[in-house]
Amino acid sequence: MPRISDPAPEFVGQSTQGTVNFPSDYAGKWVILFSHPADFTPVCTSEFMTFAMMTEEFRKYNTELVGVSVDGLHSHIAWLRTIRDNMDFRGWKNVDVTFPLIDDVSMQVSQKYGMIMPGESETSAVRAVFIIDPAGKVRTILYYPLSTGRNFDEILRVVKALQTTDEFGVATPADWRPGERVIVPPAGTMDVAEKRMSGQEDGVECADWFFCTKELPEDTIENALQKK
Ligand code: BEZ
């Protein structure tokens, strides 16, 4: 299976939106490739409705969604039609899933991406999330078991954190949200450490020489990320 910073494994898949050449169809975009165990199951239905409701929010950050499961294309089509025509979750109704859902009956994608965890299930994928950058490199991997629905706000938070790191050359602390202080790269010399600790680096505050933060206003981040 791929690891963080590896190139995303390539595949060609049939989806509810036609043929997908992955990741080349998404060159220049961020993409979230995520697996679910089975169509017509309740946790997966709640997840698909949530992701579908957030599709436009992800697009603001140049991010596209691609789902995959070991069910076939006709099952996928029937399930997405049922979601649109019959489902009501959190008051959401008539939810159109417009991102591709890939038929992986052959398990070629699930196997390549390490989405099958035999201890959990031999025949279906766990809930995996791969966040892939515009250069086709895997930047984050998240795994959840069959019984636990994912936190989609967290997935969006990670996308924003990765993009903020790339754009501004900073790291983000625990539970960071845009607008909160960010972590400046560690001092590489005694001299820089000394300057930071004596308050000589503009806007940088240090709890100790290795733990220094600065302000990065939310509108600065949003302007930079949403224009991309
Ligand atoms: C569900 O999506 O509800 C589900 C799928 C597989 C196993 C358990 C729950």
Image (spheres, rainbow, N blue to C red):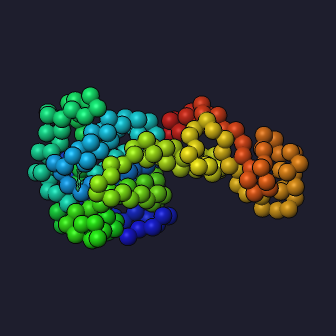
- Residue at (82%, 62%) from the top-left corner? 189
Residue 217 image point, x, y percent: 64, 34
Residue 191 image point, x, y percent: 87, 58
Residue 96 image point, x, y percent: 23, 35
Above or below residue 72? Residue 217 is above
- Residue 89 visible from this viewpoint: yes
- Residue at (39%, 50%) from the top-left corner? 31
Left or right of residue 77, residue 127 in this image: right
Above or below residue 117? Residue 28 is above
Q: Nearer the viewer, residue 90 or 49?
A: 90
Left or right of residue 122, residue 218 in this image: right
Q: Quadrant of residue 58?
A: top left
- Residue at (24%, 66%) from the top-left corner? 121
Residue 98 image point, x, y percent: 25, 40
Q: Quadrant of residue 49?
A: top left
- Residue 23 visible from this viewpoint: no
Left or right of residue 83, residue 215 in this image: right
Left or right of residue 186, residue 156 in this image: left
Q: Quadrant of the N terminus?
A: bottom left
Count of labels in the image: 0
- Residue at (34%, 68%) from the top-left corner? 114
